[in-house]
Amino acid sequence: MLTETTQALPPRYVSPAGPPSAYAMLTRALSDPASVISDAIYSDWSLKLPGPRSPVVVSHPDAVRQVLLDKDGAFGRNRQLRLLMRRAWGKGLAAAEGESWARQRQAAAPAFKPAAVQSAVPAMAAAAERAARSWSTEAPIDVSVALARIVTEIVMSTLLTGLDDADLDAIAADVPPFIRAAAHFGLLDLLPVPDAWIDRLRGMGRGGPEQRLRAVAARLAAARATPPDRVQDIAALMRGAGPLADNLLGFLPAGLETTAQAAAWGLYLLALYPEWQEAVYREALAADATDPTLPIGRQVVQETLRLYPPGPILVRAALRPSELQGHRLHPGQVVILPVFAIHRHRQLWDRPDAFDPDRFAPGAAYDRGAFLPFGAGPRLCIAAAFAQTEIAVMMAVLLRHFRFTPAAPEPVISLKTTTHSLTGLHVIATPRRG
């Protein structure tokens, strides 16, 4: 256990000042929920947003379990939530429900079993090694950009094979704007008209990132359309289980953006807290950097995911009259689970805003309903173990090459779609001697 640091607290999200407007409440409650939630949710167990049948925000672990485990089928997606998911991912795993979802998840599962994750570790380490040799040490590095390229290479060499370097660079650049566009929710989406009309109107304004990513997904799907396929990646596993191009488009942002942002936050935190950076470095030297156990590194990964969860918000809707945390819910009423606030809740965590990986040391106790970086219940992120191993291995490899210190500008945190910094995450990478 390391001694408690006396350094300043790491960056945190700053809620917008003042109550949201009626228009903001209508549109942002689904596409940018954090912007309409007051800071009271860091200490209270629930909030009711203004307006009749407006969203209810709950943060108590018991309420979280009630919604996400959903043992009685009371919670799911309403029309607007289904529209948001389908707009980006069609009928693929991320948007599918019921039997279609179960079939697709079962097909993808072998790619994320422990043995499969273990077999991917050398590729993870190799991608980080190649990046380390190319990094400039003369100017600050925005690790949110640099790590996106590494993560893209890892995914494309383990889960989705068959792309060249130009494809990797384009995907790393296109995924963030694609996610932001897919999450946009406006008044058009509230109109009582058939979803197909809305899709047609929105299709007129689809930009380059979505078109390019769809083209990549279509090309990968076409290459695996006719068995036998000699490539046994996740695309091959899911062939026939659902719309392959939709699933590939879903795995691109899910496997790239969220992991890259979490890894970037991890490196930035280690730059802020040199005693933990040194501990991870020494562990990486003592063990093979490709050893996926890396217990100290994994503690750092978990604490990073607590402070900066990849998915800062989970949203569901009541499917029938229900009661949740003392609130009576009507069918279709939205329930917001503010993961970013649950992870820093004053009644759930000691020193909730501090960086302390010892929270996750062996034997440490915490409520599992208070730690939701990848969700919970049946729809727990299928790639959670892969992502955590990937981040730990990347950090170990990069720390063997560099000592990191923070650089300007200061992060400005946004919680729209992912936990990311609008100003980037900049560090100085100083080569280690010997």
Image: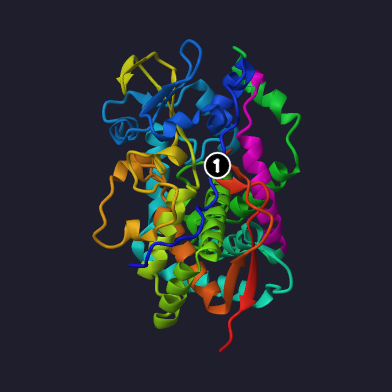
Residue, far front: 6
Horizontal side of residue 90 vs 213, given as left or right? left
What colour scheme governs how the chains and residues are painted in the rendered image of this protein? rainbow
Write the residue at 39% across / 60% down. 357
- Tell me which secondary structure the magenta stretch mostly adopts: helix
Residue 313, position in %: x, y? 48, 37
The crowd level at tag 1 (other Cα within 10 Å; few <14, some 14-19, many 20+) is: some
What x and y, as percent, mark residue 270? 51, 64
Q: Is residue 187 magenta?
A: yes
Q: Is residue 333 left or right of residue 149?
A: left
Residue 133, placed above or below residue 366: below
Q: Residue at x 66, y 60 (%)?
A: 168
Closest to the observer: 126 or 367?
A: 367
Q: What is the quadrant of the C terminus in the image?
A: bottom right
Q: Locate the N terminus by quadrant.
A: bottom left
Instruction: Give the x, y percent position of residue 181.
Output: 66, 36
Residue at 38% x, 70% y is: 294
Circle count? 1
Relative height, residue 389 to residue 33 (above, below): below
Q: Residue at x 53, y 30 (%)?
A: 33
Instruction: Decide whether residue 174 is among the magenta residues.
Output: yes
Q: Residue furthest bottom?
A: 434
Q: Position of residue 223 (x, y in %)?
A: 61, 56
Q: Is residue 328 left or right of residue 254?
A: left
User: Is residue 83 visible in the rendered structure shown here?
Assistant: no
Q: Residue tagged by mark 1?
A: 13
Q: Magenta residues, as a range?
A: 166-188
